[in-house]
Image (cartoon, rainbow, N blue to C red):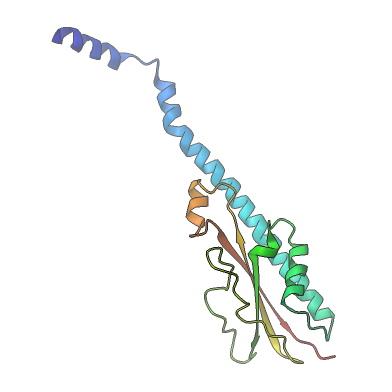
Amino acid sequence: MIRHLGNFLRRFRNREDGNATVEFVIVFPAVIGVMLAGVELTFMTLNHAMLERAVDVVVRDLRLNTGSNPGHNELKNRICDKAVFIRQCSTNLKLEMVRQDPYAGITLPAVPDCTDLSEETRPVRQFENGQANELMVLRACAKINPIFPTSTLGAALANDEGQYALTAMSVFVQEPL
């Protein structure tokens, strides 16, 4: 009985007809993981580029339209109109605008003010329209849902609410009338 078992195991060890299957089972998940991470990174970069561009275009309009003082909701709507790839932009975007002393440097809080799905909607942290010739800093924070939330990169990027934050910042001088 033991001799038959030894012969069977020897024959099983010498056979090579399952090699491709074993190699496929080992390599396929890694290749799919890299592909999903590449797609996730592509969409994250696209969303960030669209947010940066939207903030830059809106701030450029602010600079050119001297004397206009749009409020938080108007700026948010303008940015959302320009950032076409960001899904649910009106609910996932939060702005903060702060006056800065041009001689002291930019002193914004290190952590941006973003939307938080686990809490009720909070009021804007800081949003001040500046006076003539004041340096203003506008920071936008958008929360984005990962395309593949269970992939390696999607799970690493996502926080408690299952989203990751993208920020864009621009500086401008409030022109006089």
Residue sitting nearer the eye, 112 or 77: 77
Residue 15 placement, left or right of 98: left
Instruction: Report the residue that reaches farthest toward the left.
Output: 2
- Residue 19, compared with residue 70, is above or below; it is above
From the image, which quarter does the C terminus lie in?
bottom right
**101 sits to left or right of 76:** left
Q: Is residue 116 placed above or below 43 in the rendered structure?
A: below
Image coords of residue 1 (percent x, y):
15, 7
Q: Residue shown at 56%/46% (left/top)? A: 148
Residue 98 sits in quarter: bottom right
Q: Residue at x 66, y 58 (%)?
A: 47
Number of numbered tags placed on the structure image: 0
| Residue 129 locus on image (x, y percent) | 72, 86
Q: Compared to 157, does 101 lie above or below?
A: below
Give me the residue at 55% from left, 58% from top: 163
Q: Nearer the viewer, residue 15 or 74?
A: 74
| Left or right: where 85 falls relative to 109 | right
Q: Position of residue 65 (x, y in %)?
A: 84, 80
